């Protein structure tokens, strides 16, 4: 009986694994089709200063699936990373971002607003990644210092000298790099001084309970101090309440992103948001 139970357990496990594989396979086919049929689009979440002035946006990928409706990047990005589809998808995001920056450059109200693009490890590790960035910028006449890249710690298990060299080349192009989800990966603080970073993002996991969980408060404070001491800008993500904002502000945080300010917006709504916020300052 024990052997039979074990056998059944194993079969159940095999079954679940097969189901997951089948799901990933069909999602993979759907991503392929979705790229061809232009089912993907970008939304833009404001990044603001303490006074409410919008200094930039994060470009976030969205997928309107014909049958499933909106599919979260949390579900399809890992599949696309696994299958390698993140490479064509990522170049599409980059092209779209540069096109957006080109349009903003012609709109006085959008002057000085930067755009941050999320980049997967696989994308960044391509030998010609910097070349791809340079040609996308050139193609759309993008001014340096308007385009920013968000990288994650998961990338840092790879060849550090290659990563550092690429970040230096990007820096020379005028493209800044931000370390996303800071504190959630395999953090070794020693890499922070080796990487030519411009900014770190306090992960929303630490912001969420910053008022109620003393450890999260200590981590958020430590990241802000680290940024100050290393000369890096720090932006807090996932800021949802005034209480969270006030805590961060009291600890010298100068840049904020989260639902308190705005959800990610369609391009046209983001442009209106920027116009409204600069009008209020007059
Ligand atoms: P991320 O880069 O850390 O982006 C922040 C996520 O937090 C976004 O989720 C955003 O919508 C959400 N968020 C913003 N403010 C708040 C808030 O106040 N509260 C809460 N609870 N959430 C907030 P989203 O858009 O679902 O994206 C999830 C992740 O998918 C991103 O995390 C990023 O890692 C990845 N991703 C999105 N777009 C791209 C892309 O174009 N390329 C790549 N490689 N990854 C992407
Ligand atoms: Mg990000
Ligand atoms: Mg993040
Ligand atoms: Mg995240």
Image (tube, rainbow, N blue to C red):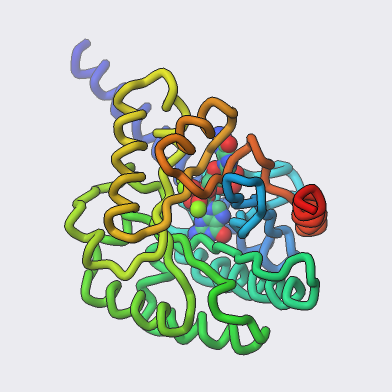
**Image: 271 above or below 125:** above
- Please name whichever residue, 40 or 154, is drawn nearer the observer in this view of the structure: 154
Residue at image coords 23%, 21% = 6
Q: Toward which corner of the image does residue 111 lie, by quadrant? A: bottom right
Q: Toward which corner of the image does residue 165 lie, by quadrant? A: bottom left
**Image: 175 above or below 191:** below
Q: In the image, 186: left or right of 102?
A: left
Q: In the image, 45: left or right of 154?
A: right
**Image: 220 above or below 212:** below
- Can residue 46 be seen here? The reply is yes
- Please name whichever residue, 48 or 207, is drawn nearer the observer in this view of the structure: 48
Question: Residue 86, position in %: x, y?
Answer: 50, 64
Q: In the image, 156: left or right of 224?
A: left
Residue at image coords 45%, 70% = 176
Question: Residue 8, position in %: x, y?
Answer: 32, 22
Question: Residue 147, position in %: x, y?
Answer: 56, 71
Residue at image coords 27%, 61% = 156
Residue at image coords 28%, 54% = 229
- Can residue 25 be seen here? The reply is no
Q: Quadrant of the N terminus?
A: top left
Q: Which residue lies furthest to the top in this view?
A: 1
């Amino acid at each position: 009986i024990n052997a039979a139970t074990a056998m059944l357990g194993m079969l159940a496990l095999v079954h679940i694994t097969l189901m997951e594989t089948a799901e990933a396979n069909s999602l993979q086919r759907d991503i392929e089709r979705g790229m061809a049929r232009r089912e993907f689009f970008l939304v833009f979440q404001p990044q603001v200063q303490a006074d409410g002035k919008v200094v930039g946006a994060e470009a976030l990928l969205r997928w309107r699936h014909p049958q499933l409706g909106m599919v979260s990047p949390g579900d399809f990005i890992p599949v696309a990373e696994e299958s390698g589809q993140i490479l064509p998808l990522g170049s599409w995001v980059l092209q779209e971002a540069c096109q957006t920056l080109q349009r903003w450059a012609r709109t006085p109200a959008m002057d000085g607003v930067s755009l941050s693009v999320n980049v997967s490890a696989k994308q960044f590790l391509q030998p010609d990644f910097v070349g791809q960035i340079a040609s996308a910028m050139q193609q759309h006449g993008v001014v340096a210092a308007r385009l920013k890249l968000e990288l994650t710690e998961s990338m840092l298990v790879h060849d550090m000298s290659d990563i550092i060299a690429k970040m230096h080349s990007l820096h020379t192009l005028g493209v800044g790099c931000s370390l996303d989800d800071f504190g959630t990966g395999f953090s070794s603080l020693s890499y922070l001084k080796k990487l030519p970073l411009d900014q770190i993002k306090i992960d929303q996991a630490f912001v969420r309970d910053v008022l109620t969980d003393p450890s999260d408060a200590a981590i958020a404070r430590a990241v802000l101090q680290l940024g100050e001491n290393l000369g890096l800008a720090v932006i807090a993500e996932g800021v949802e309440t005034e209480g969270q904002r006030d805590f961060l502000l009291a600890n010298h945080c100068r840049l904020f992103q989260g639902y308190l300010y705005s959800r990610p917006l369609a391009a046209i709504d983001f442009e209106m948001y920027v116009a409204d916020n600069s009008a209020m300052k007059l």
